[in-house]
Amino acid sequence: MMLILRLALASLRSRKLTTALTVASIALSVTLLVGIETVRAGVRDSFAGTIRGVDLIVGARGGTLQVLLSTVFGIGNASGSVQLRTMERWQQHPAVKWVVPYSLGDSHRGFRVVGTSTEFYERYRFRKDGRITFAAGRVAQADSEVVIGHDVAERLKYEVGTPVVVTHGLRDIGTSNHDAHPFRVVGVLARTFTPIDRSVYVTLEGIEAMHEEEGGVAAGGGGLNGGSSTSGSSDSGSSDSGSLNSGSLNSGSLNNGSLNNGSLNNGKAAAAQAKRDAVVEANKRRAAAIPKAPPAGVPMAMPGAEPPPGTPMVMPGAEPPPGAQQAPPPPGGALVMPGAEPPPQVMEQVKAAAAQARAAAKPPKVEPAPEAEHADEAEHEHGDDQITAFFVGTKNRFEALMLQREMNTDLVEPLTAIIPGVALGELWQNIGSAEVGLRVIAMFAVAISITGMLVALYSSLEARRREMAILRAIGAGPRTILALLVLESTLLAFLGCVIGVAFVYGGLALAQGPIEQRFGIHLAMRALGETEYSYLAMVMISGMLIGFVPAWKAYRTSLVDGLSPRA
Amino acid sequence: MSAAPAVELSNLRFAYRPGHDVLAIDALSIARGETVFLHGPSGSGKTTLLGLLAGVLRATAGQVKVLGQDFTTMSNGARDAFRARHLGYVFQMFNLIPYLSVRENILLPIRLEPARRARLGGQSFDAAVRDVASQLDIARYLDTPIGELSVGQQQRVAAARALIGSPEVVIADEPTSALDTDRREQFLELLFRSCEKAQATLVFVSHDHTLMPLFSRIVELGEINTAAEPSRLNTATFRVPTPPVSTNVR
């Protein structure tokens, strides 16, 4: 056997060029296979890692994908808007650790403008544990400050200090510029390779201020963003529904009350609630000045109060909740939502679990007493009633499912709460045809590259029939010939695999940066997965098998060839 | 078994395609130690006969006995093993594996086949190589790359490889056809001497009738092969439509 190995090695060495070419062709095949798989995985991971750290995204009642696309990817419209109050109400939920408002509807030179809180920058994660970091500057705090994503800065050549004018609606054309309220760039985010890079961030107050200074120009401006819309002109339409949302404020306040009753009977929360109520009252007054605004004087927080008769529990125009989980509330305005809401005992359990989780949890990293902070924010923030969506972080991730269910069955305002990871998975499955396409390409690549490899191996072996003839004449049996040729082709396939994989990693090391910059896909250096190994096994096995063909031929024919000098 | 003739053919028939015999030899016997010059016109079946003698081809009918062993009853593998053990083979040209050194080429048969190794009789590989190489006057080229050898030297290396481990039968298929005329006799002399020393029977195929006198026996294949087509024999030097004759010329 040693002789055969030596022969095989010597033979390969003697035909350096052929060997090198064969190995190169196999290596390229393997590179193609593993490369496609890496890209596929990279695309999928990049996609799945678009948003992390957020346990729930809550928007107006609508499709899961609609909420996901409109918030995370900035594609399409949200189905409506959510009252800021609703977010605040849910903020009090014991399972909720933090909430971040997310308000869409305006643009700056084609980039979406997002109104959010400063907490957004701390909470949002992407990919493994990517945090939003600042390439320059700081977070937007005042209402005239904006933070821009990396692509925005790059494409518009903006830097800290650049004045920015925001357009109402999402297109630059033909709609009003909020000239009256100019912004100034105070921060530029580092690249994230997520849609964050293509967004402009302002504070909620900023958006509000912008719209207020505009005065009555934009109809229904009271709804700061009556649902994000891709065209500016449709905005007023969605503002209507925004106003309608405001109309059902009373039920919102009712639920505030119920929450207080049900779970948050502590003084601190009550104080915060009071503050908020004051602000909301102020907002109400402002809103009252705007046409189509809801009637003022709706009771804001009356614990235990029954909803006024005829108060719509579900907003006009909103669709009934999917699955009809929601039964109409009993006349008494139950604190716990019938049918959908977990029974009080369960809530108690949840609270207990949450308390435990909180106790067990490490001290929060960046969290100077969130409730106080929010109460503080409430004094100067939330100038408006409507946001597009809000992000929720739970204290205990296991509560996210329960919370999602609770939110989806919120009787006060129809919401759609999605778990980003799950929704991204669904979306990926929906657009899975792209993946199927890559798979098909990969399969073609497998077929082509294995064929190419076989041709290379076969011709390199075919050229050696003379050698086989000599060995046969000396007395080498079929097993020796077979072992020699199979060993050679296997060696070549193995070398090709090793070099091909090395190519992939080398190429990845070199091209990772450029690919990220060019395509926004982070191709992670990762260990070979099952698919890759199966590809490699396929290459190895077919490489091995192809050795049998010339070996068989050599045995059958080279005897004659070898013995005939004219061959 | 040692008494058995080196080669014994009886009623041999061989056809590549059924019904088209290319070889039909009723009887041919080659004694041990003979040096046989086998000749015949193209198409007389020389190469086929060598294939049968080497155990590479299997007779369609009749018997092929080499050293008393009947090839027709042996399996392919057994014939391979037999060839490795008892036969040496020299091609017309391109005998050597180009990426191995002269030494390694000569050593191949005994490396490949343990039985052949045993025939060295305890002699070390190196001594065996030196021995046979010096007989053929190539001892100084043992570590020379094959590509740097002349054709004559290469053929001597091939002969050395065929002779190492003292096979009983050496088959040479026009080994001198690529050599200059004056080199041919020199090569043959070395080959004869080595065969004699190894007590090997030599079956030598050639067109070159000038070499004939050097051999102990001459076999004209066209004479003994009844299947040879007369039309093909037109080109033959000895155009004798001979009936099958037991050719014990000497």
Image: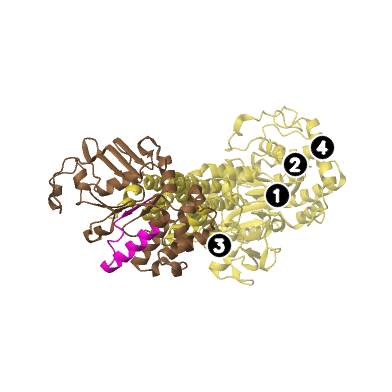
* Amino acid at the residue labelled 2: Pro
Tint applied to chain B in the drawing: brown
Do callouts 3 and 2 mark residues in contact (Cβ within 8 Å)? no
* Amino acid at the residue labelled 4: Asn
Asked whether A54 or B95 is in front, the reply is: B95
> Which residue position is annotated with label 3?
A506
Precedes in sequence: disc 1 or disc 2: 1
Tint applied to chain A in the drawing: yellow
Precedes in sequence: disc 1 or disc 3: 1
* Snapshot quadrant of residue A339: top right
Of circles 4 and 2, the one toward us is 4
| Left or right, B115 with reference to B34 | right
Of circles 1 and 3, the one toward us is 3
Label 4, label 3: how far apart the Cα atoms are: 62 Å
> Which residue position is annotated with label 1?
A284
Q: Which residues are magenta?
A: B169-195
Residue A318 shows up from this direction: yes
Q: Label 3 crowding class (10 Å Cα cut-off): few <14, some 14-19, many 20+?
A: some
> Which residue position is annotated with label 2?
A299
Give me the chain letter of mark 1.
A
Rendered position, A312 above or below A147: above
Label 4, label 2: how far apart the Cα atoms are: 16 Å
Asked whether B185 or A53 is in front, the reply is: B185
